Image: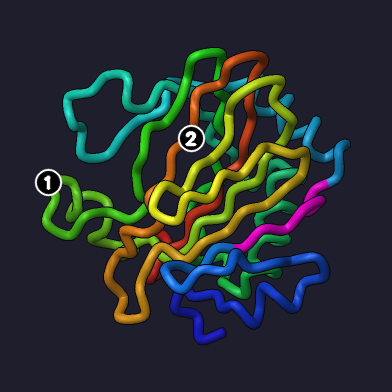
Amino acid sequence: MDGSGESSAARLLAHPGAARFPSSRLELFILREFLSVERCAQLVALIEGNNRPSTLADYNGDDAFRTSTTCDLSTDNPIVGALARALSDLSGIPLSHAEPLQGQRYEVGQEFKAHTDYFEPNSADFQKYCAVAGQRTWTFMIYLNEVEAGGATRFKVIDKMIQPEVGKLVGWNNRRPDGSGNAATLHHAMKVRKGRKYVITQWYRERPWG
């Protein structure tokens, strides 16, 4: 890789079991059993031990837009450090371009309404979040448990629904080939109807994380 925060279809598909969703509108990949049941349980325990209300860039006035809680995960923890390295190896993106790993917990009724992960260039918070490390390039999300009901991730533009499964990884390129944000990555973390939902999220940037 060229160190620019970019992965590639060739890199991801070289991993056994990885599959690309057949769409010309975005690069979306799914890889089942990326993490073991045991490792997922360890990460769930970390999330349970330290979480805070999830925040939102470019607040839109809707206090119910994102209602999960978030756990900031430090690579000083051996489990987190190993996961960060595994994701870097999978994607080919240097660890220097990775945001700190986060875990999210969704209770019954909680969701993250339809959104994209990149920052809108003309938004009020763009300079705040992108001045140093640049735009988000790729997102990798891992489900840590199976949800009793609800909790799917819906990519609305391509009408693709992804159900939580223990250890399943979903990854996508947030940008178009010209580098602009790809609106087809619009996705909705749908409400949990029964049980809880736990995920890990890794975002990468154009430049090294400051």
Task: Give the numbered dot on residue 189.
Answer: 2
Q: Amino acid at mark 1?
A: Ala
Residue 207 lies, with reference to residue 162, above or below; the image says: below
What residue appears at the point 70 percent right and 69 percent down from the top-left corner? 89
Asked whether the viewer can see residue 164, the reply is: yes
Q: Residue at x 41, y 62 (%)?
A: 174
Q: Residue at x 55, y 63 (%)?
A: 28
Q: Is residue 179 magenta?
A: no
Across and down, in percent, residue 74 comes to 60, 42
Q: Would you say 1 lies left or right of 12 here?
A: left
Q: Quadrant of the C terminus?
A: bottom left
Q: Which residue is mark 1?
A: 124
Q: Residues within 10 Å of mark 2 (few under 14, many from 20)?
A: many
Identified at 31% across, 58% down, the residue is: 183
Task: Inspect the magenta stretch and tell me whether residue 33 lies in it.
Answer: yes
Local SS, label 2: strand
Residue 116 position (above or below residue 37): below
In the rendered view, does 36 fall on the left or right side of 203?
Answer: right
Q: Disc 1 or disc 2, which is closer to the eye? A: 2
| Separation of marks 1 and 2 at Cα, in angstroms | 24 Å
For the residues bearing labels 1 and 2, Cβ distance under 8 angstroms? no
Magenta range: 29-35
Question: Would residue 54 be found to the left or right of residue 166 on screen?
Answer: left
